[in-house]
Amino acid sequence: MNEDPQDEPLRRAFRGLRESDQSALPSLQRLLARASGPPPGRTAVHRPAWLAVAVALLAAGAVVLAVHRGSGRRPPPAAGDLVTWRSPTEGLLWTPGRELTSELPRVGRAEFAWLEAERP
């Protein structure tokens, strides 16, 4: 370890910080006692009440689901509906210059006439 005399003020400052930190720490026994007991302000009496509420809500949800599932069944869509269906966002695909990519260009003799005119 470096025993430079210029480091002594730093050692004293860090020793003072360490001592002030240790004086602010709670005791280990108090921390362990607090961790093993119920949270402050709550008791174990509330657990059965919450459990009863949760079971009642699950039962009510199961009843509503059973009643709703059996009543309003829709028939499957007709084949004609599926054929004429259009995407609601189809218009977003219409971009400027779309006609340039929707058809293949026609290349014929008229486009290359200038090549034949230059030949001797």
Image: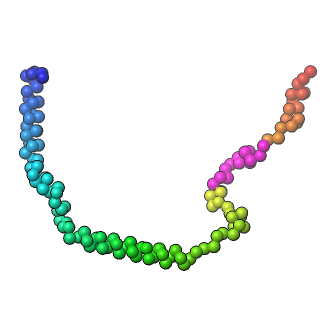
The residue lying toward the viewer, choosing from 107 and 40, is: 40
Q: Is residue 101 magenta?
A: yes
- Above or below, 79 relative to 34: below
Residue 40 sits in which quadrant? bottom left
Residue 108 sits in which quadrant? top right
The residue lying toward the viewer, choosing from 51 and 104, is: 51
Q: Which x, y percent locates residue 91? A: 65, 57
Residues drawn in magenta:
91-104
Count the marks: 0
Quadrant housing the N terminus: top left
Residue 64 sits in which quadrant? bottom left
Residue at position x 88%, y 24% in the image: 118
Residue at position x 16%, y 57% in the image: 36
Quadrant housing the C terminus: top right
Residue at position x 11%, y 25% in the image: 7
Say how the picture is coloured: rainbow
**Left or right: 72 as drawn, with respect to 87:** left
Residue at position x 66%, y 69% in the image: 77
Q: Which x, y percent locates residue 14? A: 11, 34
**Left or right: 106 as drawn, with respect to 29:** right
The residue lying toward the viewer, choosing from 54 and 115, is: 54
Q: Is residue 24 magenta?
A: no
Q: Which x, y percent locates residue 9? A: 8, 29
The residue lying toward the viewer, choosing from 101 and 78, is: 78
Q: Which x, y percent locates residue 111? A: 85, 35
